[in-house]
Amino acid sequence: MLRAIAIGCAYMSASALGIVLNCRAVWSIISKGKLSQIFSALYILYLQPLIADIVFELIYLCYLSPSIIIQKYSFQDVLIANPVGWYVSTTIDALQSYCWSVNSLSQVSLALNSMKKIRVFIPGTLSDERVRRMRIPVHYLDNSSDNSFEFIVTVLHRTTFFSMNRAIFFSVIQHLLALAITAAVHFILPCCSIAFSYEDYGYREVAKPGVPNYVFAYVSMPVKVGCATIPLVIYCMILISARTYAKQFKQQSPEWRRRRKKELRLDQACHKMIEEFVYSLRLEHRIGSKPMLRFAAQFASIALVYTFSSFSFNLLMVISRSESDWVKGIPVILGLLNSTSNGVVYLVNENRKGAASTNAYSSSDMDHESNLLRIKKRILTMVAWLRVFAKARQLPALVDGWAPLARSSEVSDERC
């Protein structure tokens, strides 16, 4: 009896803490108008796991935790008598599976947000050798006989694919997939659904004798492996990329830059300056220095917590057969921690910078708006400077992360 009270109180405390933190994160996003800003798509995606986590923890706070405590005093197998009790338990189990599926799919969608690009059109008469020497990723648009071409340089690692409408669309798809997974686990496949057990304070599979475990083979394990592997791979790539660019940036000392500029001919200085300027912008943002590494580490830790909580149920099903029944409650604690991790990281970054924002790497985009505006201003300054050297009919304004400067055919013959 004392064990049931202790475990019920532990579940209740963990779920209550998670609800408070997640509600604070949701309120911060809504009250500060994040859904109406330029990066509203990221916040729309981020709200999905937060709301699902709140519902998941409310079930523990309002029903499961009190049931564990009260049931020990009621001297009956179920808290609510059948047949109503069966419908209540089935609904609770299905709703928890749905919330968990939303959280799992959100791990992937938020990790994919790290693939971001802003591109800049630059006119140039740069040779392939010079482009390779600067190691700038370019995409040729127009080649001519005089080796003049227009190319695109990746400045800021950001993509406009996740617009507001697309974020809403993918959020709807995400919920539909979560519903499909829940229906397959609990209602469609003949074996084996997952239910909460008041006897061992955790989850168990409702197996049917002689029926293969289709849920584990075709639904549960593939979803767990995919949702755990994809985010970890992306975050590891971010960490490796950041360290690689940092090392590359350190190798190019100011003395090297000054010596390199002296070697340039006067007629190449204009294009070379643009080339080095764009390259330095790209390095400056992609390195991100400590903030980038900090965010990647934070959201990689979230992915690790999700991985442990996802696979702990299957591991402890085998390990705990010879142990006490309360050991099966460990996956519940890990699940509640996983449901709180997104809110914790969001609030920590909000307090660190004074404003919560959604990061590309899994959830919080710290400093991204300020960096984007600063880089846009610097690019516009370069555009104004180019007006002296280019006879373009029209230099369009910077819109939606694209800065068309001039076509190669419109570049003046004047030298820098």
Image (cartoon, helix red, strand yellow):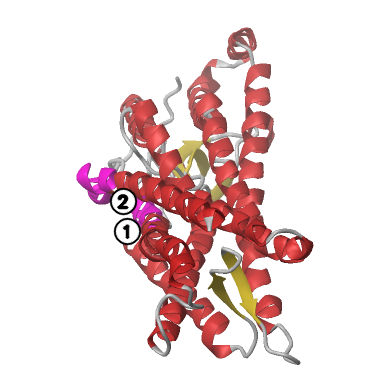
Q: Would you say the magenta stretch is mainly helix, strand or loop?
A: helix
Q: Quadrant of residue 260?
A: top right
Q: Which residues are magenta?
A: 27-47
Depth check, front residue: 267 or 62: 62
Q: Position of residue 98 (x, y in %)?
A: 46, 71
| Marked residue nearer the N-terminal end (1 or 2) | 2
Residue at left offset 30%, top offset 40%: 395
Task: Provide the residue designation for mark 2.
Answer: 40
Q: In the displayed structure, would residue 96 be above or below residue 146?
A: below
Q: For this rendering, which residue is in front, 191 or 279?
A: 191
Check residue 164 in the rendering and tell me which mark sits there, or answer none: 1
Taking the magenta stretch, the answer to whether it contains residue 42 is yes
Residue at 68% in and 36% down? 240
Q: Are marks 1 and 2 in contact (CB under 8 Å)?
A: yes
* Foreground pick, 292 / 49: 49
| Residue at the (70%, 65%) spot, across then down | 314
- Expressed as whole percent of the image width and height from the top left, the position of residue 180 reads 50, 80
Label 1 CA crowd tier, 10 Å (few <14, some 14–19, many 20+):
many
Which quarter of the picture shows residue 146? top right
| Residue 110 seen in the current view | no
Near mark 2 (Cα within 10 A), the count class, few <14, some 14-19 or many ≥20, is many
Q: Quadrant of the C terminus?
A: top left
Q: Is residue 326 left or right of residue 55?
A: right
Apparent side of residue 350 relative to residue 324 in the rendered image (left or right): left
Figure label count: 2
Q: Amino acid at mark 1?
A: Met
Secondary-structure class at tag 2:
helix
Residue 395 in magenta? no
